[in-house]
Image (cartoon, helix red, strand yellow):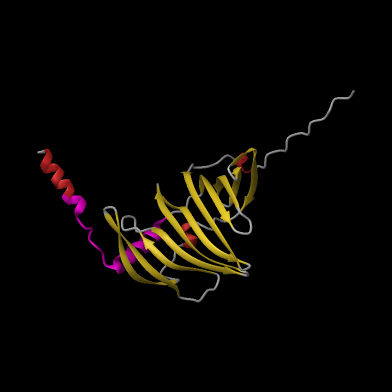
Amino acid sequence: MRIAALFGLLVLLGMTPVQLDSQIVLERYELEMGDLKVPKTMIFSYTVSQSGPNPIEARHMIYRSGLDVRDETLAVDGTPLRPKIVRIGQREDRYEIQRVAPRASTYTMLFLRAIRDGGHLDYEYETTPLVASGGFVVERLVIDGDSYLPTVIAVRSSSGDAQGTGKLEYAKIGPYCVPVSVSVDAQIHGKPAREHIAWGAYRFPPSLPPSTFVAPKPLPHATLPPI
């Protein structure tokens, strides 16, 4: 009985997933992207490594509620900061999936290949903007054959004296699709530069206390007692 069960498992593992028509995949992708919610409140950590004109490696903890952001720098170049550096401000999330992922209303998508991913297939497309743009352009898109959401988005961008190409990777965590890594190769003023960011430890609380976005008060300066 055990031998028969093992044989059946091996057969299942060896089966090739059925490849869907590429247009059906795009239709499901559009439906999923249309229904996908963006988290209004989240907590996560990330590490950033940069090489080039301004090399640095840092570890951060982020608290976000809408545009409100608390950015805590926990370590720089492997050295923990005590006290940590806290910055409070407002900024949009430039890696938020709905801002980055190409859609049928703005891009044409040409099917390139299916990629085996465990027990299913992912689908890779070449993307071309319907309106020429020299700033930020998506060139490749990989759609997960399970969730029909993006897993990889390859981009190129240019701004002034900086040009670069990058690969963004996303994953579905709970009900959301969030970035897990990005790697960028760039030329800044003609000099090579690289950046890698890795995100993790995502949490999505229903809300954050207002004190989260209040800058900490500076510590009082020590004074010598009178002699």
Residue reaching furthest to the top: 227
Whole-percent x, y for residue 121 in the image: 29, 59
Image quadrant containing the C terminus: top right
Answer with the quarter of the image where residue 101 lies.
Answer: bottom left
Main SS category, magenta section: helix
x 34%, y 55%: residue: 147
Along the line of sight, the residue nearer the viewer: 197 or 65: 197
Whole-percent x, y for residue 3 in the image: 11, 41
Tell me the magenta residue range. 11-36
172 to the left or right of 227:
left
225 to the left or right of 98:
right
Image quadrant containing the N terminus: top left
Answer with the quarter of the image where residue 190 lies.
Answer: bottom right
Whole-percent x, y for residue 20 in the image: 26, 64
Let me know if residue 203 appears in the view: no
Whole-percent x, y for residue 84 in the image: 63, 40
Indicate yes or no whether the magenta region holds residue 15: yes
